[in-house]
Amino acid sequence: MALLELRGLNKHFGGLHVTNSVDLVLEAGEIHCLIGPNGAGKSTLFRLILGEHHPGSGDILFAGENITALKPFARIHRGLSVKFQVPGVFKGLSVRQNLEIALQRTHRSVELAREIDRLLTFLNLEAEQMQTAGNLSHGQKQWLEIGMAISLKPQLLLLDEPTAGMSPEETHQTGEMVQRLNADGMTVLAIEHDMAFVRQVAQRVTVLHLGQVFAQGSIDEIVADERVAAIYLGQAHA
Amino acid sequence: MNGLPGFLRRLEGPQTVGRGPAFWITFAIVFAIACAYPLFSDGYTVGNTVYFFVWVFIALSLCVIWGYGGSLSFGQTAFFGIAGYSYGILTLNFGSAYGFTLVALVLAVVIAALFALLLGYFMFFGRIAGVFLGIVTLAVTLMLERFMAQTAGPEWRIGAARLNGFNGMSAMPPLTIPWSGGDIVLLADIGLYYAVLGLLLLVYLGLRILMNSSFGNVIVAIRENPERAEMLGYDVRKYQLITFVIGAALAGISGVLYTAWGQYITPSSMGMTAAALPLIWVAVGGRSDLTSTVIGTLVVLAAFQALTIYGSQYALVFMGVLLVLTVLIAPNGLVLGAMNLISRLVARRSKGDV
């Protein structure tokens, strides 16, 4: 069953056609990676799915419902959640308060405190819970934001470069966590440049190039595709 | 504090400085001194102290909107003026019998809040943010000042109340509490002092609870990162609008109390100087904390008045210098900086004991 369906999505910024007739179907329960050279329109596609940008034309269907006209917060209520590319934690607040803000919409009092503690353990941030989130290391900030995003128990988790700035070990751990969440039934769509991560988690890969879906398939099919190699190399030689 | 009902536990929390017995004992002592103070002073000085207290509400309004919410409103004086004029118009028309002045107080604050609802709706749902919010709110208060200043003619009247242009309205009745043994008129001395002190206590404690509640959490989250807050499922603009309306109501309380205190209100109460001064009090005290805002406002106001008496026109220049120094030395506010230092020292000492 399709959880997310993009139909003929178009977005222009002035004369720039950043999203060009994108059709994409995300099956419930899969881990799908979105790759492509810089400027391919990956982050813009995320913003369209989240409702921060509005498409010039096309439709976005989530769990069978057309959500194209919904405001971002309403899409979150439907079961979407996101971790941004630049860590979007509340820098001036404590780690614990960050999680409390994420969880308080759905949890109350004792249950809320218990859920925060559970997440702190899961994220390995118990010792840092009273620290100001702005003082965390880059990797810890990434984890905290992932924690906030998954605390909403979304049906679909959007991850924009979840492992950016992480060490190989941290990247691998993040991959394992994504697989654990997926095993519990969460569908994941991730933008990622780290091919080791993509190889570790992706069940399907979509390549975006100049705003269009360029290729789609398993990671092995994508790696074997000479045209895909060409656009990356072309980028490198430019 | 586990024995207390849930909402009272919110008196302490991450959004307010001051916790534990030491803070609340100090608080109780300060409040007791404030209660006893009129017994050792004369009516004029007490009346002057009320004048200081009156301004604390508008300072708290900026603290909530700007310090906690992160939206700089330069026009809190607009709501101050609207509520002040509303109180004057209502009481000059309907008098003070049967406790109507208290009804007028509430109505005037509601009128200011409704105006903020309308203005805030267009601003926040029109995605006006940052410095532009300050520009729009400043423009609104300056326009109101201009408008009221040209209402000198006899055609500018609402019922029995003449608006009187630049000279402003005067001779409205002071706040009056209906009582079986004869009405209690709260003139600008001891009577009004206790009424305003009581209101200040309620508002201060109420705001502490509000800011440490889940609502307050969302407000500071929006200040820190509005995009993240929206992507956790919060309707950011709705929360900003509610905060703005609460702030307007607080500024309105100041406006009504000021009008009832001096029995006059003029357009200059919505002018440039009037709009800028609360920003300085709040910035110097520490905009992101209620207690710092209250202390900072009272201290700066007292200093400003002393300077006005002895140094006349240099007082305003001094305020500018004070603001620049604050921004350079303690951007989060001098009082807040000092309080954080004290709590760190106390924490270190108690750690040393263990």
Image: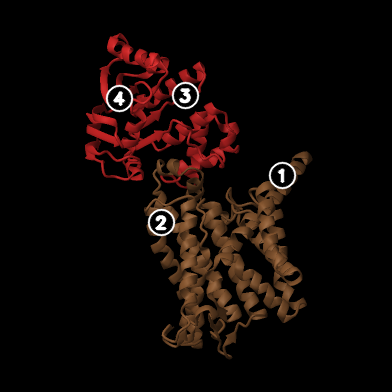
Query: Position of A180 compared to B328: left or right?
Result: left
- Name the mark nearer the viewer: 4 or 2: 4
Task: Reply above or below: A43 against B90.
Answer: above
SS label for mark 3: loop
Check the rendered structure and report the hue given to chain B.
Answer: brown
Q: Amino acid at mark 4?
A: Leu
How crowded pointer 2 is (Cα within 10 Å; few <14, some 14-19, many 20+) is rated as some
- Could you say which quadrant of the image residue B197 lies in? bottom right
Of callouts 3 and 4, the N-terminal one: 3
Q: Amino acid at mark 3?
A: Ala
x and y, in percent, of residue A218 in the image? 29, 15
- Could you say which quadrant of the image residue B295 lies in? bottom right
- Name the mark nearer the viewer: 2 or 1: 2
Residue marked by disc 2:
B123
Query: Position of A79 compared to A173: left or right?
Result: left
SS label for mark 4: loop
Q: CA distance from mark 2 to mark 1?
A: 40 Å
How crowded pointer 1 is (Cα within 10 Å; few <14, some 14-19, many 20+) is rated as few
What chain letter is assigned to the residue under label 1?
A: B
* Tag shown at residue A210: 4
Residue marked by disc 3:
A164
| Residue drawn at x 42%, y 14% as measured from the top left | A196
* Tag shown at residue B220: none
**Chain letter tied to red:** A
**Residue B7 shows up from this direction:** no
What chain letter is assigned to the residue under label 2?
A: B
Q: CA distance from mark 3 to mark 4?
A: 22 Å
x and y, in percent, of residue B226 in the image? 45, 44
Q: Amino acid at mark 2?
A: Met
Q: CA distance from mark 4 to mark 2?
A: 36 Å
